[in-house]
Amino acid sequence: MLSKNKELWLSLLAALLITAVYAFIVYWFKAIPAAAGFFGHMIGVIGFIFMLMTETLYSLRKRSRKGRWGTMRSWLQFHIFTGLVGPYMVLLHTSWKFHGLAGATTLLTIIIVISGFIGRYIYTRIPRALVGVEMTAPGAVNQAAVLVRARRTLSIWHAVHIPIGMALFVAAFIHIGAALTYATLLR
Amino acid sequence: MEKKPFGCLTVPGLITAVLTGLVVLAVGLLRGGVLFSPGPLNAQAGALIGSVTSHADLSGRCTACHAFFWQRAAMADRCVLCHTDVDVQLQDPSTLHGDQFSKKPGISCRYCHPDHLGVNAPLTDMTRVDISHQTFGYSLAAHQHQADGSPFACKTCHVNGYTTFDQTICTTCHQQIDLIYTQAHLKAFGESCLACHDGIDTYNHNFDHGKVAFQLTGKHVPLDCGACHSGARTIADLKATPQACSSCHAKDDAHQGQFGTSCGTCHSPDGWLPASFDHSKTKFPLTGAHLKLDCIQCHTNADFASLPADCFSCHAKDDAHKGQFGTSCGTCHSADAWLPASFDHSVTKFPLTGAHVSLDCAQCHKNGVFTNLPADCASCHPDPSFHAGLFAGIRCDRCHNTTIWSPATFNQSHPNSCGQVTCINHENATCRECHTVNLSTANCLKCHDSNNPVEGGGGD
């Protein structure tokens, strides 16, 4: 089970480590780390970079079939890892305040993670080769009907998931710009 | 194989991205920068400045406070556009803001005055204030937490602005801490707390009275300040409190002023009793049996000032001489005891000499009579039959001395009983050699016989 869901276990481990550090910060300073503070900023920035990697790297790998940068399964596992850990760090970055655009961005982050879980479930319904490439005839002939149905479902999911992701990143970039303008670069 | 476009760059994705941007833009146009607010602005109403009374009134108008980084002005420049009084203070290091600005010239207002923390959140973070409140005459050392344990904010005390302070706030809060004490304190010292208290707190229960001239010891230690300093309204009043015992204890004086006002001569702050009066400093130092007496045995009726010092004033009733020796008991007696007494008879008209010295007083002073005793010998020594009345009216000491009666020295002319004017050849004879019975008779034959009429025979 561990090897089968390795990315989930690693994500859980990373989340626990991050939580431990967060709890120590809370204990030490006797306060929730502010979003604009050093630690709050740091986990926000790293979390967002993870989310950017989630959004881009797996898609790039999918479109580089001639490349030798690891298997599709590994990239998917990394995609899932960053897609879980990044949003979790962003969630901690909020300091549990959900005002305005930052709050909306957090909401979209949570939605995109849930959507990601759904997508992964649909993805696993498609028969694939060991390297993660979709199986074709003759190995999957007897699963043609399942394949067609699953791919249609995945297509629908993509149609929803990608716009949510786009909305999230546009909101996130605006939030970052506003934070830089009104806080970080404020004199 | 057909090359797929990058995952997110789908038509729906791009449309959504644009729509998201438009929504943000629309909200920005309609509601200002509220979308970018990290939290509600403070809504505590203050003085009307321009058209607003609180930061919350500026909600959505980000640029009212936030200057863009490419602009020359900083955020603090926007602050002082409204808070003009602070702008003036920044130039004066003796003011709160001027003091802070002089210590950290680059400091921004928001360093101590964070906002976007909620409508009721404190606008001043005292932990950021690098200031000794003592600079302004009052330390916050004793005011870190309120009665309910919550930290102080500026507005806790400076309700109407930090440049003003209503001292009823002190009493309001301190009555919550200790109603009875505070009311008693107010009654004793009035309501001008700052006249004495500096917040350290120099003048409170922990005040080190040892640093002043009047040290607190004994029963003075547990007293409330008001017990001695009642009515004081300033530190000068506290310092001017009279230090003489009588200033507080006149009403307690059991001696009714007879010993003056220097209570400390006999009493200590540990209590009125025991008292340690040094009688040696008086005109009547205590010695002998007087040392064992209780004060009241002499000082009856609490009279300590006008008692006579002569013995007789107390001992008249004890006078065994019934006044015959006057009232100067000390002439013969000491304070140790009545006896032994040491009377100097030489100062009388009858100095004791010879055999008189060893006599008991009563052998002469019979029946306790000491005065008007006759000094002549005959009053005590009747004429002996041996004289046969021949010396009546003649002083005894013509022949006798006080050492011994006999032998006596008869140096008068001897009666011529033997036909001679003087007792020729009898100069060395004693009276009793001739007068064997008494002086009226003589016995010549004791020495002379018929055979030897001139020279004595075997007689002595």
Image: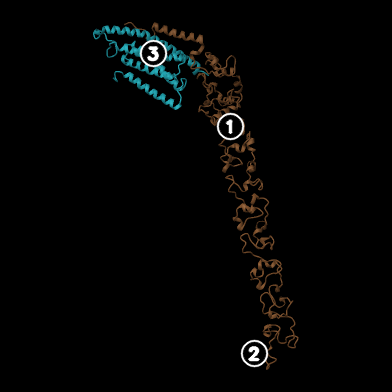
Chain colours: A cyan, B brown
Locate residue A15, reporting x and y percent: 37, 21
Residue drawn at x 60%, y 19% is: B84
Q: Estimate the spatial distance between the alpha carbons at disc 1 and disc 3, rounded to whole Å.
A: 64 Å
Q: Is residue B36 visible?
A: yes
> In which quadrant of the rendered image does the N terminus of chain B lie?
top left
Locate residue A116, reporting x and y percent: 36, 13
Relative height, residue B91 to residue A62 (above, below)? below
Q: Amino acid at mark 3?
A: Ile
Circle 3 marks a residue in which chain? A
Residue that mark 1 sits on: B183
Q: Amino acid at mark 2?
A: Gly
- Disc 3 vs disc 2: Cβ atoms closer than 8 Å? no
Q: Secondary structure at mark 2?
A: loop
Front residue (pair A155, B295): B295
Report which quarter residue B356 is drawn in.
bottom right
Q: Secondary structure at mark 3?
A: helix
Q: Which mark is residue A112?
A: 3
> In which quadrant of the rendered image does the C terminus of chain B lie?
bottom right
Circle nearer the viewer, 1 or 3: 1
Relative height, residue A86 to residue B346 (above, below)? above
Do dots 3 and 2 share one subunit? no
Report which quarter residue A30 is drawn in.
top left
Residue drawn at x 46%, y 24% is: A31
Tag 2: Cα neighbours inside 10 Å, few (<14), some, or many (≥20)? few
**Residue found at the very far front of the displayed protein:** B367
Residue that mark 2 sits on: B458
Locate residue B112, reporting x and y percent: 53, 23
Locate residue B440, reporting x and y percent: 71, 83
Circle 2 marks a residue in which chain? B
Q: Earlier in the sequence, mark 2 or mark 1?
A: 1
